[in-house]
Structures are given as C-alpha cells and as structure tokens.
Amino acid sequence: MAAALALTRRGHSVTILEAFDVARPVGSGLLLQPSGLAALRALGLEDEARELGASVSRLEGQDLAGRRLMAMAYDSWRPGATGVGIHRASLFGILHRAVLAAGIEIRTHARIVSFDRLNDPVLHDEAGGAHGPYDLVVVADGSASTLRARVRPRARAPLYPWGAVWANATDPDGRFAGTLSQRYEAASMMTGILPIGTGPDGEGNQVSVFWSTPRAEIEALLASDITVWRKRLIGLWPEGEPIFSQFTSWAQFAPATYRDVSVGTWSNGAFVLIGDAAHGTSPQLGQGANLGLIDAVELAERIETPPQLFGYQLARRLQTAPYQLASRALTPLFQSKGWIGPLIRAWLFAPLAQAPGLRRIAALFLTGVFRFGPTPKVLKP
Ligand SMILES: Cc1cc2nc3c(=O)[nH]c(=O)nc-3n(C[C@H](O)[C@H](O)[C@H](O)COP(=O)(O)OP(=O)(O)OC[C@H]3O[C@@H](n4cnc5c(N)ncnc54)[C@H](O)[C@@H]3O)c2cc1C
C-alpha cells in the first residue's frame, strides 16, 4: 500500500493485487523507527501514526538476575528522538484509508501465482483471473513470496530455526510505557513487552507481548496448558503480572516464523521485489517494516520511465545489506540453546550500554537511519 501511494503521487496509475478476500491486517504490533516514520512523513501519514501509536524512547533488556544486557535510548542518536510502537491494525488502517482516498484500485481475492513473460507481463491468480499487462510489477508479497522464485530462480529464503508467539493485551497502569522491555534467560528464553498505543476498537494502553520459541516447538506450545506457561512467565517477570494474567487461551496468540531472504539482484524484466520479498530478516532489530516503507518511497523517487531499476537497487542495498548482516549475526545471540550465544551477547552488548561513544553508534543503527551513501532528501528523519 505504501508503494502504491508513493507511485500514485508520482503520477503513475497503480492497481493493488491482494491475496486476501478482504483487505485486513495480520499480526500484533511492531516498532516504527525514525527511518520508517520519515517514510510515512513523505507519504503525509506520520502524524496519524504517532497519534495512534505509542512513543518508545528506550530499549531495555535484563537477564533474570536483573543485570542490564541491553540499554539503548533514541536520545543517544538525537535529543528528543523516539520510535513508535503501533498496533498492526492501526498502521494497516492508516495506509488503507490513504489508498482509498487516493482512488487506488485494490483487487482482493487475487493470489498471484504466475505470469506469462518478464516484460509487459500478464499476472495470473489462483482462481484463473488474469491481470495486466503492466509496465512494472512491484512484488511485495512478503518473506514467503510466491513470485520471488519465478522472478529470481536462484533466490533463497530459509526459515530461521526459532520463531515466536505474539499476543496483544492492555497495560492497565501504563507501567511499561515508553520502553521496549525484554527479559532473557541465556538465549533460550526471551520475552518482551512493546507498547503499541491504541487498539482497533479504540482501547488505550495496548501492548504486544512476545515469547520466543524454537520453530519446531511452536505447535506443542500452542497445544499445551496455558496456565502452566503463564505461571512460569509471571514467575520470570513478576512486574508483568497485570498484563500476563490477561492471557487465558492460546487463541489470543499468533505464531510467527522468519526467513533469511537472499535474492542477489532484486529485479528482472518489468519485475522488482521490495520489502520482505527482497530482504526479509528476523525481526530481532525491529527494522523489516521500516525498510519496506523506505523501499516504497525510494522506489517512487528513483524510478524512471520506462522503469530503470539499477540505481534504486544499488541505493537500497547500501542500507538493507548491513541490517541483513547484523540480523544474521545477532539473532543466534538471542534465540539459541547453549551458552556461547549469551556469552558473546554479554561481551558485545555490555560496553554498548555503558560507553557513550558506542551508545551513539548503536543508537544510529537502532533508529534504522544507518546506510552507506546518501539518504534521499525526502527520507531524511
Ligand atoms: C513477529 C514479528 C515481529 C515483527 N516486528 C517488527 C518490528 O517491530 N518492526 C519492524 O519494522 N518490522 C517488524 N517485523 C517485520 C515486518 O512485519 C515485516 O518486515 C513487514 O511486514 C514486511 O512487509 P511486506 O509488505 O514486505 O510483507 P507482508 O507484511 O508480509 O505483506 C505481504 C502482503 O502480500 C500479500 N500476498 C502474499 N502473497 C501474495 C500473492 N501471491 N498474491 C497477492 N498477494 C499476496 C499478503 O496477503 C500481504 O498482504 C516483524 C515481523 C514478525 C514476524
């Protein structure tokens, strides 16, 4: 939707082809970084996101002994800077309303499964419908993309060995406001609370809670007795009790798995991959949606007629590559069994939490604005 908006505003005529029967949000909450907020600003949507979301000024992680393993403040990057935790339904609603207001056609129930040629392609959906031909196809079908392997046959997107379960709840007294809080036990237990502002029915003080788990164990967890898990969680993190006690059924939770996407060149003929379809990662650094929003705005900025995609790809890779590399390297330090991951994590992150110079570099990375090469003016936070 962000790409459709950005391209429409540049005078292109855009149709959105969406697999769902009815356009709808998926998942619980996410953290918008200053980089993603700048992309929303370019689309005229930042204020609404800030209004519906919750300001997040710090990221803080402790082990069960109360040792601070992670402490990063947006302030260390720029005084007054914040991220915004937001309910996925809110972000979806903001983009969806803007798409409708811009008169962009959304064809739902259009799961695209194939196309007939790389240039001037006609796309085919699973129900036998045909769409196109189009001058440009922006492939934004996520990390489990169907079209990626057809556009770039050598692309790879293996699943990470760990995933998570997520649910939303209310933080009744707002005690977790302003901070993405995490708790760790070695690297085999990680749980977190992210404030996400207003829920879809207008309820305030919403938070997303996640619980990390090996992918192979997600099904068994969701079939287990939730009261046993809840008791363990409250024992590990007593301050979260008012939130965790709202979890009475696994039906409140959504499972999530992640892919490590590597594609080489993102385009072929009239096709260009963006978002998770091009560079999906584990959500450990909270950057995926932000990078996708930036892709959308930067694509519209850099595209030419007829479409020339080389400059766009080069510029974007100078930002996405460092985040993908960092995500690959850091994920096992937070999601793995054994003692090596936590040991490296303590060695790596403790100085980051303490030394001001290092704190600033870490904050620059956290905000999502890091990139080699210049940031287009319209995306400057
Ligand atoms: C648990 C979890 C937590 C996360 N937390 C954060 C965070 O805090 N901050 C952050 O920035 N990112 C976060 N992310 C990552 C973020 O969710 C993704 O990077 C982002 O959603 C990618 O957006 P996208 O538009 O590329 O793909 P998606 O959001 O996956 O959207 C793909 C769309 O394409 C449609 N589609 C799929 N296949 C087809 C098809 N064949 N034909 C037509 N339509 C199709 C789908 O229905 C969907 O609407 C998190 C991810 C997970 C799993």
Image (cartoon, grey):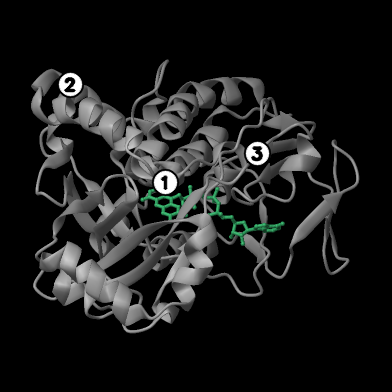
Q: Earlier in the sequence, mark 3 or mark 1?
A: 3
User: Does the CB distance between marks 3 and 2 fall below 8 Å?
Assistant: no
Q: Which residue is mark 3?
A: 273
Q: Which residue is mark 1?
A: 283
The nearer-to-camera label among 3 and 2 is 2
For badge 1, the amino acid type reads Pro
Q: Which residue is mark 2?
A: 358
Residue 251 lies, in percent from the top left, at 44, 80
Residue 125 lies, in percent from the top left, at 81, 61
Query: Residue at left 80%, top 56%?
Result: 113
Q: Is residue 78 visible?
A: no
For badge 2, the amino acid type reads Leu
Quadrant of the drawing holding the N terminus = bottom right
Query: Residue at left 44%, top 47%?
Result: 289
Q: Is mark 1 within 8 Å of ligand 1?
A: yes
For badge 3, the amino acid type reads Leu
